[in-house]
Image (spheres, rainbow, N blue to C red):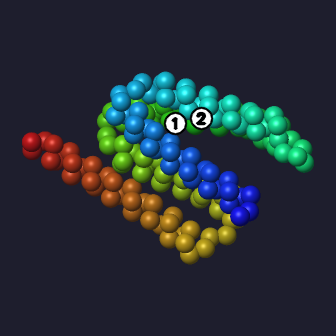
Amino acid sequence: MATGQIYLLLGLLSFSMLGVLHKVADVKQSRPSAINALLFSSSLLFVFLFALFGTPTGPAVPMRVAAIAVPFGIAASVAILTFQAGLKHGDIATSWLAINLSAGIPTVASILIYDEPVGVGKALALGLIPVSMFLLWKDKKAQEGRDQVS
């Protein structure tokens, strides 16, 4: 298995565990700020150790990448904190789906900025994102209607 595939698998597993742990924290009624602090301090430690020890061939992270990572990490922290606070107003399954669908934004940017090739699968996935968002909106409206009748 190639190194890129290992990173992809680890990222997928980590992102999946993040969703599971958010659900556990929500059920246990944990504070969103505490979960956010634990999430980002542990990821900072992991990335710092990886960057510090690097690889046998040299530093793992160029300084330019580290400089870019800090503001993106802060933005991600704010996004997760906002997501956690917003869970009080809706289902976690719906919220998590919306977060996952937001991956389409950097994908479209990559296509437009870097002329990334678009295969049939990627085009189909990108085309289904607005359909999914519409269905989520329609479901939310139906749920609100059912709640008003009750």
The residue sitting at 35% across, 28% down in the picture is 29
125 left or right of 6 in image: left
Q: Quadrant of residue 150?
A: top left
At 56% from the left and 32% from the top, the residue drawn is: 39
Left or right: residue 67 versus residue 117 is right
Relative to 65, say whether 108 is above or below: below
Q: Residues within 10 Å of mark 2 (few under 14, many from 20)?
A: few
Marks 2,1: beta carbons within 8 A: yes
Image quadrant occupied by the N terminus: bottom right
Give residue 134's position: percent from left, percent from top: 35, 58
**In the image, residue 59 lies at what x, y percent?**
86, 41
Q: Residue 11 location, x and y as percent?
A: 61, 50
Disc sitting over residue 79 in the figure: 1
Amino acid on which the number 2 mark rests in the picture: Ala
Q: Residue at x 55, y 28 (%)?
A: 38
User: Of 68 and 92, which appears nearest the observer?
Assistant: 92
To which quarter of the image does residue 6 belong?
A: bottom right
Please state the horizontal and vertical placement of residue 40, each as a whole percent of the image: 59, 31
Residue located beneath label 2 in the image:
75
User: Element under label 1?
Assistant: helix
**Above or below for 132 versus 48:** below
Three-letter code, disc 1: Ala
Q: Which mark is residue 96?
A: none
Q: CA distance from mark 2 to mark 1?
A: 6 Å
Residue 84 placement: quadrant: top left
Label 2, secondary structure: give it. helix
Q: Residue furthest left?
A: 150
